[in-house]
Amino acid sequence: MLSVKRLNLDSSWHISYNRTDFIIDPWLIGSEIDGFKWLNEQWHIREPVKITELPDYNFILISQSYEDHCHIKTLEKISENKTLIATEKAYKKLKKEFPKRKIILLEDNKITSYKGLNFISLRPNKILDPVYYSVVIANNNEAIFYAPHGFILNDQQLDLVNQNNIKLLITTFTEFEIPKIMGGKVNPGMENVYELYNQIKPLNTINTHDEEKKAKGLVSSLAKIKYADFDKIESKNSINFIRIDNYSKKIIT
């Protein structure tokens, strides 16, 4: 069985898969700051799930090193006996912040097994990409493909992903672009959603990392943002879209 539950309206999730419960990218308290407050600081408009009210979980998966995914203040508040699993850049950051915690590195394009699930970290191919990873979370012959900033799969990565039947694609629907010197197109929007859908043919698609947040700083002043029309996508439903805009648990069939 697979079930998902939003922990905020951005990109924090509780997943129950193959009787294993885990959390992805928890940012549940305070603001997130990219480098300096003058550069970028953001807040949730709607309060996330309280840390004291989190469902049970076995470990925490961190997909990116950026603070809206790897939120140190949240992780400090979460029980220290929980294992952290992280892609390369996030792993390096977490080892500095939590040298005594158990942290498992997800090596690029290699299978890492933990708690009955198999994980594969995929790294972007573009030289100038600010590096936004995607992660395959596999259970037997089916899998979740988690790409909170979208993803362009090369042939090798596509072969790796398609070794499983993709039960669920979780990716951003928002187009978010800043000047190239600051990162360029951070979220690629619906064009990439359709591309991923056609490549991996998921049974279900859920959006993530699409929250309209309160923000200040240079990044927000320069950003060009195009949010998806969820009503239109839901009515057309050409990507097996499941709309989740609250904190209720959703069973994925």
Image (cartoon, helix red, strand yellow):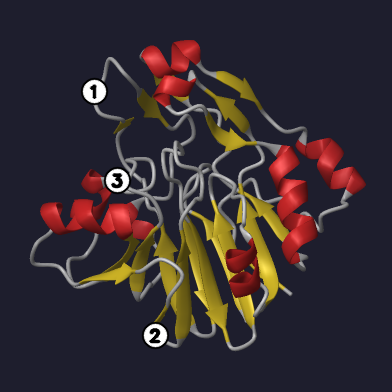
What residue is shown with label 1? 36
Question: Is 158 placed left or right of 31 in the picture?
Answer: right
What residue is shown with label 3? 71
Residue 37 placement (x, y as % from top left): 26, 20
Label 1 SS: loop
Question: Is 26 placed left or right of 92 in the picture?
Answer: right
Question: Residue at horizontal 30%, vertical 52%?
Answer: 89
Q: Name which of mark 1 and mark 3 comes first in the sequence.
A: 1
Residue 128 placement (x, y as % from top left): 44, 36
Amino acid at dot 2:
Lys
Amino acid at dot 3:
His
User: What whole-number distance in Å separates the C-alpha atoms at marks 2 and 3?
Assistant: 23 Å
Residue 9 placement (x, y as % from top left): 53, 42
Residue 171 placement (x, y as % from top left): 61, 50
Q: Is residue 182 above or below residue 250?
A: above
Q: Residue furthest left?
A: 100
Q: Which mark is residue 208?
A: none
Using the image as rendered, state which of residue 17 and residue 157 is in the foreground: 157
What residue is shown with label 2? 115
Label 3 SS: loop
Q: Is residue 114 above or below residue 161?
A: below
Question: Residue at horizontal 38%, vertical 13%?
Answer: 218
Cβ atoms at labels 1 and 3 below 8 Å apart: no
The local crowd at label 1, few if under 14, some if 14 to 19, many if 20 or more residues have their Cα within 10 Å, is: few
